[in-house]
Image (cartoon, rainbow, N blue to C red):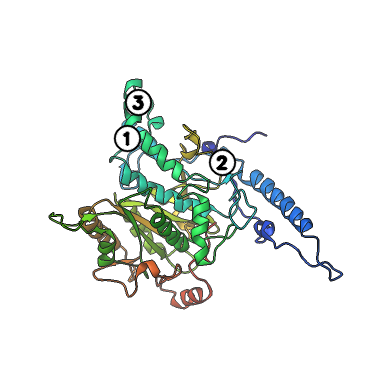
Amino acid sequence: MNPSSPCEGQSPEGDPPDDWFHLSTMSLGTQGSDGSRDDPEEPEERGRLKSKLVLAWNNVKYGWSFKSKAHFSKTSPLTMLGQSYLLSHGVERECFRQAFATLLWLTYRRGFPQLDGSSLTTDSGWGCMLRSGQMLLAQGLLLHLLPPGWTWLSANHGRRKSIVSFLESRTEVTHRRVVSWFGDHPIAPFGLHQLVEQGTSAGKKAGDWYGPSIVAHILRKAVDAASAEVSNLTVYVAQDCTVYVDDVVRLCERPLSEGSTGPSPAWKSVIILVPVRLGGEVLNTTYIKCVKNLLRLECCIGIIGGKPKHSLFFVGYQDEQLLYLDPHYSQSTVDITQDNFPLESFHCKCPRKISFSRMDPSCTIGFFAKSQKEFELLCSTVSTALSSSTEKYPIFTIAEGQGQEDERDAPPNSITHILTKDKARLQRTNNSNSMDEFVLL
């Protein structure tokens, strides 16, 4: 049996035992049965052997895909990140195909340099939430750096060579640079190595499972640390399901230099991340309409979510099914330090769908505004979308004023659960599980 292309089908699901992925990080010099200390080299050798076994297991588990294509309706509109497509129309079908293939696809990788503090050279089995977060951040970066409506050249068949060459000199260089920022190399500002390092302040390490709220704060820290590579961009993480307008404005305004004149301060682009919980142990279905309305907005850049124990990156929907990119496919690491490194494995041509009913209630919703005018429009359109819910309590709110504390100092798990009709069960969930204990992997 030969592995098929990752775009031909869905990777297998499920997870190994909880302790499987932590075997390679066991401490050295364990005590023997006779009370003596083992030779430090022996447990080190055992650790290397266990790492190889973990790698072999994950390569088998996530290195295969099965040919089961998703079926899409030709009569119902398909919505993806603020755009609507009717697939019965050839032109719109091709536009959707190009737009989906343009999205950056960040998946499990194997064979990269060891992560600090561990012997891990793959994130298969534990890094899918970080990968989903990477995909959301990548979408924001593409909107920040490339012109509106840009599509990846390789997704556009039939272009004349002269046009391709011209556009490569203008946008493909930027596209390649953005992809390199997510490479699995210590120098990549948004690669796995940097994200794992940023997670240490929240008590996370390589091989741990990450929740959508912690990933939101990790992304914020990574963008702050990469100001030399990515200028005029900031990330705001909502507090307690509330986006405080004054806090966002304070982050985005760039005061004019002393002695200069101008009508107003310059403005940074902003990615707004809102960690939420759409119910107790399962999704509260009254929020489905609201989620759909948010995905219809052009300012929405996706949802870091998934189904229980299986993170996915949601980018749209059709009827009662969500459209997503799946990070659960193990690919060889691409050396992004080489000129003209291959880009094909960072894009996927086969969209997948999952029923709303299978969506895990824990997720982080992302938005992007490039200017102050876009941010003001975002506040208006998002507030309208939020009001569409028939539930008494909205998914989140946008409020004037400032939060009670600097959001950059807020703890990663400071999130208020959305109340549901079953308040007693939700309270038990809130007491027994933090946002990041309800893991989507």
What residue is pinned by disc 2?
A: 333
Mark 2 and mark 1 in contact? Answer it, CB < 8 Å. no
The quadrant of the rendering that contains the C terminus is: bottom right
Looking at the rendered structure, the secondary structure element under dot 1 is: helix
Q: Amino acid at mark 3?
A: Val
* Side of 209 relative to 150 (left or right): right
- Could you say where residue 412 lies in the image, as x and y percent from the top left? 45, 67
Task: Give the answer, above or below, for where 11 lies relative to 167.
Answer: below
Residue at image point 34% right, 30% down = 169
Looking at the rendered structure, the secondary structure element under dot 2 is: loop
Q: Amino acid at mark 1?
A: Glu
Question: Foreground: 313 or 182?
Answer: 182
* Side of 399 relative to 63 (left or right): left
Q: Most extreme residue toward the right, as rendered?
A: 34
The quadrant of the rendering that contains the N terminus is: top right
Using a 10 Å C-alpha cutoff, classify the residue at mark 1 as few (fewer than 14 neighbours), some (14 to 19) or many (20 or more). Answer: some
What residue is pinned by disc 1?
A: 92
- Could you say where residue 424 lies in the image, as x and y percent from the top left? 47, 78
Q: Which mark is residue 164?
A: 3
